[in-house]
Image (tube, rainbow, N blue to C red):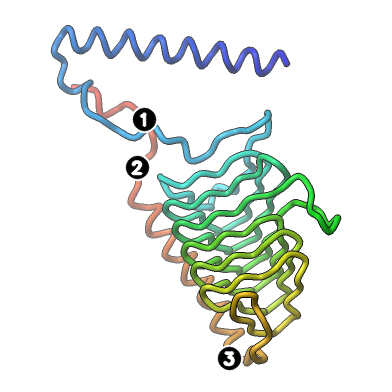
Amino acid sequence: MLRNGLRTTSRILRECGKCVERCACQAQDAAKFTETYSRHRPVLPINGKMPVIDPTVYIATNATVSGNVQIATGSAVWYGSIVRGDNNSISIGTESHIQDRSVVSSVKSTDSGLPGSVSIGNNVVVGYGSVLTGCRIDDNCHIGSCCRILEGAHMETNSSLASGSVVEQGKTIPAGEYWAGNPAKFVRKVGEHEKDDMLQYSRDCTEMSEKHAAEFLPYGTLFRNE
């Protein structure tokens, strides 16, 4: 309770200070202070819980990671994606990637009685525009673009989901199987070469995330100095 009160008070004081600074700079016609910049916060605490993120993780500037979230080495949350751990915990393993415009969110509870948390293993790639809610994804899985995985669903190791598929609540995709459709159904077994390709793809994404991270300078106000 005291911590929340201090946080609210500090936010008010900070915003008041910024307002005074802006007004004074406008009065002095200081052009260098009037340039616009994004105030978006990629990482923020919710209900007193701050995300725990390895220093090697790349969080895109317009992505959002909030609440009870843990992200391990070499992973990335790409542009426009959201990882929300405000209702329950979310864990993301090593070299796993939440690609552009995807949403990963936890829930307080599920109808099936399974945990509402989200667990994403190592070397997992979540395709563009996909939505994952209260589910479990094991190691070396590939999720295509625009997929939906509902509460209580489970993808076992080396499984793959075709783009546009929907995995129903409580459904399990067995290890080494390729599923597709709405609702998703078994299509065929995943070949050994495909398993190697999925692993390599996650590593390629990690290499690319390092290149993107290198293009951004550390946050600061040094640019204001004359």
The earlier-in-sequence mark between 3 and 1 is: 3
Residue that carries the numbered disc 1 in the rendered image: 220
Front: mark 2 or 3: 3
- Label 1–label 2 contact, CB within 8 A: yes
Q: Which quadrant of the structure image shows residue 33?
A: top left
Cα separation, mark 1 vs mark 2, equals 9 Å
Task: Provide residue 179's location: percent of width, then percent of height.
Answer: 64, 82
- Label 2–label 3 contact, CB within 8 A: no
Q: Which of these two is toward me, 43 or 73?
A: 43
Q: Label 2 crowding class (10 Å Cα cut-off): few <14, some 14-19, many 20+?
A: few
Determine whether the residue tagged by mark 3 lies in a helix, strand or loop: helix
Q: Amino acid at mark 2?
A: Leu
| Residue at 54%, 13% in the rendered image | 10
Q: Amino acid at mark 1?
A: Gly
The relative height of residue 92 versus residue 156 in the rendered view (above or below) is above
Determine whether the residue tagged by mark 1 lies in a helix, strand or loop: loop
Q: Which of these two is toward me, 46 or 145?
A: 145
Quarter the N terminus occupies: top right
| Residue at 45%, 14% in the rendered image | 14
Q: Label 3 crowding class (10 Å Cα cut-off): few <14, some 14-19, many 20+?
A: few
Q: Which quadrant of the structure image shows residue 31?
A: top left
Residue that carries the numbered disc 3 in the rendered image: 193
Determine whether the residue tagged by mark 2 lies in a helix, strand or loop: loop
The earlier-in-sequence mark between 2 and 3 is: 3
The relative height of residue 220 versus residue 65 in the rendered view (above or below) is above
Q: Label 1 crowding class (10 Å Cα cut-off): few <14, some 14-19, many 20+?
A: few
Q: Amino acid at mark 3?
A: His
